[in-house]
Amino acid sequence: MSYIFRRIFYGLLTLWGASTLVFLLLRAVPSGPVEMILGESARPAQVQELRRELGLDKPILLQYRDFILGILRGKMGRSLLSGENVGAIIISHLPPTIYLALISILMTVFISFPLGIASSLSRRWDLPASFFSTFGLAVPNFWLGPILILIFSVQMKIFPVSGVGSIVHYFLPGITLSTSLSAYLTRIVKRSIDDEKGKSYFLALVSRGFTRQYIFRKHLLPNAMVPIITILGLETGALLTGAIITERVFSIPGIGTLLITSVNQRDYPVVQGVVLFIAGIYVLTNMIVDLSYSVIDPRIKVGGKIEKA
């Protein structure tokens, strides 16, 4: 239990550090939300009046105090531009990001697991897997997305260019996101299984006459899952918090798009709320991954320690 409480404490510390850093950085930007709302032609009296209404005329320490107290009360404030509740804004932009993340993760699992396992168990799959891994890691999302749009949307007219509405809209963005992740995870799957194949228990089971299918299903794969689950869990957290470049390329109104728009508009409460949400998802994902180790491998206790035989 002490480990769990430690994780919660470090998670809260991470949330505080991330939100504080964003609070300070946003207020260090020369132009602010008042100028964005009123425009460059606004008179000084109008600027001062709006700053007073928004609470931006207070000393920065008082603004920070109000910000922290608001978080402790479960209130992230309202948008400086629209006046909407920040929590409601985040929730309204969350579904597209969740759909995109789920589709990307499914594509990643269906590509990387079979390819990584096949390349580890059969040499003829080693070259295709290596080529795919190198290609996937070398190709950036901001290049792959437009290329897919040009081929499958503009030329072949199979998929929509952008936007949301049905699962078809998420196919090209899902490929864009899952390509690099699949390439990386394919290497992790292959390397993890190869490491297990080099251990003494594998050679002992082979010498006793057990079939390779039995050894793989009962021993190799379960023992190799810890690093695989770690990478997959962390990347899932990254996808759930919004793939900024991909969402912008395909005009998906998700968390990543919301963050970029709010930063450009100097909408402090929204940016702070999104950053808190992103940090919270990362902390929660890390905690779930850590706690899952003891389920995947019974030798591992909830603190990352391996029980002695």
Image: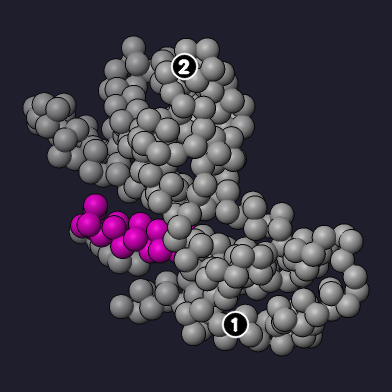
The residue pinned by badge 2 equals 157
Q: Quadrant of residue 29?
A: bottom right
In percent of width and height, residue 106 lies at: 33, 37
Amino acid type of the residue tagged 1 in the rendering: Ile
Give the crowd class for mark 1: few <14, some 14-19, many >=20 residues within 10 Å: some
Colour basis: one colour
Q: Is residue 224 above or below residue 141?
A: below
Discs 1/2, front? 2
Q: Amino acid at mark 2?
A: Lys
**Image position, residue 111 (x, y; %):** 35, 28
Tag 1 residue: 68
Label 2, residues with CA under 10 Å away: few <14, some 14-19, many ≥20:
few
Looking at the rendered image, the quarter that the C terminus falls into is bottom left
x and y percentages locating residue 41 in the rendered image: 89, 61
Look at 90% across and 70% down and name the residue there.
Answer: 43
Residue 4 in the figure: left or right of residue 51: left
